[in-house]
Amino acid sequence: MEQMVETKKDLKELKRIASQVRRDIVRMVHCCNSGHPGGSLGCTEYFVALYFQIMKYNPKKFDMNGINEDLFFLSNGHISPVWYSVLARAGYFDVNELGTFRKINSRLQGHPTTHEHLPGVRIASGSLGQGLSAAIGAAQVKKINKEDKLVYVLMGDGEQQEGQVWEAAMYAAHHKVDNLIATIDYNGQQIDGPVDKVMSLGDLAGKYKAFGWNVIEMEKGNDMEAVLNTLEKAKSLTGKKQPVMILMKTEMGYGVDFMMGSHKWHGVAPNDDQLKTALTQLEETLGDYK
């Protein structure tokens, strides 16, 4: 199968891509004065590593079935800006379409949807708690079809407060869905404040282990090398009769100093002056969209 790139990117190039993606994120949410920059910035290394190094797929021949490709599902759909940027930079659609984010009749809605037929998006998401279930279903289909490809899904930590997540977690372990790699963006923040104050998750690693998952704890989710190494480790654990969970600690707003570590930037767009400040901290490496 034709793949996205002929050779893998080196660490320096992946970091360059991440810087450009962060520029895209802050410009997109500023332009429409709406969106979720905090979690998008915090998950940039994960998305860049996944799409430019880890997954096997063909952006030029996208279809909803994804046969013989690795698949990705975004459960916490509010961080669509980072996903859209990476999809465009990976070749799914023209980069300049990023300028239509959240505008009327745009394919790039605030939360990913499917009726706009945006390449790369296979489920509508943003109603929290549902993405893990969808990913499990896709992973089971691949097992039925005897495919050797993997399914990835990203969730938020505040999303773990949803009951459907735990139904899905129990199901995946019981049915030994071992071609699935789930990741939780463990930034400790949600829209109403710190997760520990809204509803503490307790020993999250212990809970998933008790449910029958193989759990990896990643302390440096904003370090590209650490993200790559963890994803490779997760791949090595597939096929062993257990689903794999990565608890990825990130910092909300990473890369823009005044956004870092605060839930206040969960869903607030920067104003003109804040955008200028942010862009001075983020190197333009691939060329800004028009």
Image (cartoon, rainbow, N blue to C red):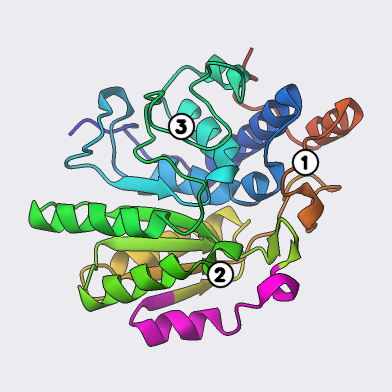
Mark 3, other Cα within 10 Å: few <14 / some 14–19 / many ≥20 = many
**Which region is colored magenta?**
195-215
CA gap, disc 1 and disc 3: 23 Å
Q: Is residue 137 above or below residue 88?
A: below
Q: Earlier in the sequence, mark 1 or mark 2?
A: 2
**Foreground residue, 118 or 180?**
118
**Foreground residue, 192 or 209?**
192
Name the image quarter holding residue 150. Answer: bottom left
Q: Earlier in the sequence, mark 3 or mark 2?
A: 3
Q: Which residue is mark 2?
A: 161
CA gap, disc 3 and disc 2: 28 Å
Q: Is residue 245 above or below residue 210?
A: above
Amino acid type of the residue that numbered disc 1 sits on in the rendered structure: Val
Name the image quarter holding residue 216. Answer: bottom left
Q: Earlier in the sequence, mark 1 or mark 3?
A: 3
* Magenta-drawn stretch contains 8: no
Q: For the C terminus, which image quadrant? A: top right
